[in-house]
Amino acid sequence: MDLKTQIITEYLTQGVGFRQLAQKYGISRTTICKWVAIHQGIHNLPPTEKQKKYSLSSMNSSPQKSSSQEQSIKELQQKIEALEKQLQWEKLRSEALNTMIDIAEKDLNIPIRKKPGAQQ
C-alpha cells in the first residue's frame, strides 16, 4: 500500500483528522484533503461525519454568503445569456459572409476561398 492510500484509509476508517495526518506524515493538510475528496468522488463514497459536520457549520456561520452567492449566480446567468446572444449573432454573421463569398465566386467566376493544400 502506498503512502497516499495509507493516509486516505487512515482518515476514512480511523477518523484521524487532516492536521494530525499532516503532522504525522509531513504532507500538507490541503493536499491530504484533496486526496480524500478525489478518492471519495471516484468511489462514490458518502462524506464522513466530520465532513458533514464541517459543511453544516460553515453553511450556518455565514448567511450573508448565500445572498452574495445568489447575486453572483444571477450575474453569471446574465453573462451567459449575453454570451449566447453574441454567439448566435456571430453565427448569423458567419453564415452571411459565407453566402456572400459563395455568390461572388459564382457570379464573378473567381475563386476567393483558399483551397486546401494550395502553395503560398
Image: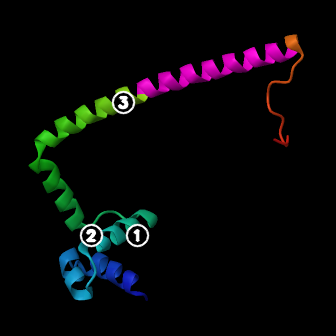
Q: Where is residue 25 in the image (x, y as percent from the top left)?
A: 27, 87
Q: Does the magenta stretch include residue 104?
A: yes
Q: Which residue is drawn at 23% across and 39% down?
A: 69
Q: Where is residue 92 in the image (x, y as percent from the top left)?
A: 61, 18
At label 1, counting other C-alpha atoms closer than 10 Å, the crowd grade (few under 14, some 14-19, many 20 or more) is some
The residue identified by callout 2 is 30
Q: Residue at x 61, y 23 (%)?
A: 91
Secondary structure under tag 3 reads: helix
Q: Mark 3 points at which residue?
A: 77
> What's the amino acid at mark 2?
Thr
Mark carried by residue 39: 1
Asked if 16 appears above or below 79 in the picture, the reply is: below
Q: In this view, does 29 lie to the left or right of 37?
A: left
Mark 2 or mark 1, which is nearer the start of the sequence? 2
Residue 116 lies, in percent from the top left, at 83, 39
**Magenta stretch?**
81-106
The label on residue 17 is: none
Most common secondary structure along the magenta stretch = helix
Where is residue 5 drawn, in percent x and y?
A: 39, 81
Q: What is the secondary structure assignment of the residue under circle 1?
A: helix
